[in-house]
Amino acid sequence: MVVSPNLESTTVLVTGGAGFIGSNLCDRIIELGYTVRCLDNFMTGKRENIEHLLEHPRFTLLETDLRDYDGCVEAVNGVEIIMHQAALGSVPRSVDDPRTTNAINITGTLNLFDAAQRAGVRRIVYAGSSSAYGDSPVLPKEETHHGDPLSPYAVTKYVGELYGSVFSSLYDMQFITLRYFNVFGPRQDPEGMYAAVIPKFISCMIDGDAPTIFGDGEQTRDFTHIKNVVDGNILAMTTSNPKAINQTFNIAAGARTSVNHLFNCIRDLLAERDPSISEMIPIYVDERPGDIPHSTASIDKAKELLGFNPTINVDEGLKMAIDWYWNSLN
């Protein structure tokens, strides 16, 4: 592709750029012609996610921790746009270790925002979370709904939104928050006790082990393929619509899927490759503290103001994800 000189001279900082979402985002921003600076401390990010970019002339890696303010100052120097993806994820992990979650997600985010405003960064796209809706029972979730947070992780992600709002009004910065709903797809880590449900299910079944379902499996989520999320980020990064600035948007598929249905779909797709998987039955255990029973997003606002339109539904996304995991795990 022919790269515009204007885009080449625009440096975009992707925090958490070696992570699942961040690395997919780095790929797309490089493809569009921008210069990318990737910040990651590799606590949860993986070097192999960005290995193919390390020699690219428009890509730079900074191995820095957001808790290091001087490192944040270095990272934002000369940057015009920040895609703030870095966070210590997982509700259960935050319940087990709230202090580290707070230090990275709140103190680290404040360090970044403060360094950014002093450096004159024009726009920050903040990776929010559907956990910000807390115990609000209203479905689908609209951006104006509020509930009490159910986990330390939810608190930290919502505080990041509040800091963004304050910084936008005090320092005339442009902030856009994208609340993600259960993102899945290539490069999502299937390992560890805090792995997300889709890669965990796929990994377990490929290994011949029955996956664990917390609760009765009838809880629902708005599972959203990574391509939809990257699309939403690019729209937020590039929008010139003044009505979209300093706003919060749901980024999701806009559909409900139960965990039981998810298991059945994954089992059926994997059984096409390994017929023995067709007989697998999940193991049900007690529900986890901090989990919500149901979550589905309204994406009307993102459609109207950003032009967001998810192009991959859950079934299509699962087929794509299984193709990737089958090749990478076998």
Image (cartoon, grey):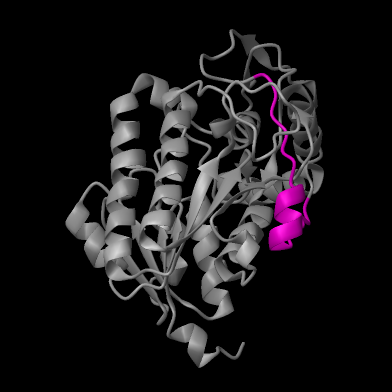
- Residue situated in front as seen by the camera: 235 or 122: 122
On screen, residue 78 above or below 105: below
**Farthest-out residue, left:** 70
- Residue situated in front as seen by the camera: 7 or 19: 7
Q: Quadrant of the C terminus?
A: top right
- Residue situated in front as seen by the camera: 214 or 75: 75
- Relative image position of residue 326 (x, y in whole percent): 65, 46
- Residue situated in front as seen by the camera: 126 or 32: 126
Residue drawn 33% across and 24% down?
Answer: 97
- Relative image position of residue 149 (x, y in whole percent): 50, 24
On screen, residue 182 above or below 186: above
On screen, residue 35 above or below 164: below
Left or right of 306 on screen, residue 126: left
Query: Quick check: is 294 in the magenta stretch?
Result: yes
The quadrant holding residue 59 is: bottom left
Left or right of 20 on screen, residue 182: right
Left or right of 67 on screen, residue 207: right
The quadrant holding residue 98 is: top left
Left or right of 145 on screen, residue 218: right
Residue drawn 39% across and 43% down?
Answer: 44
Residue drawn 73% across and 27% down?
Answer: 263
Q: Quadrant of the N terminus?
A: bottom right
> Which portion, as a residue range, is magenta?
293-312
Q: Is residue 62 visible?
A: no
The quadrant holding residue 218 is: top right
Q: Is residue 130 visible?
A: yes
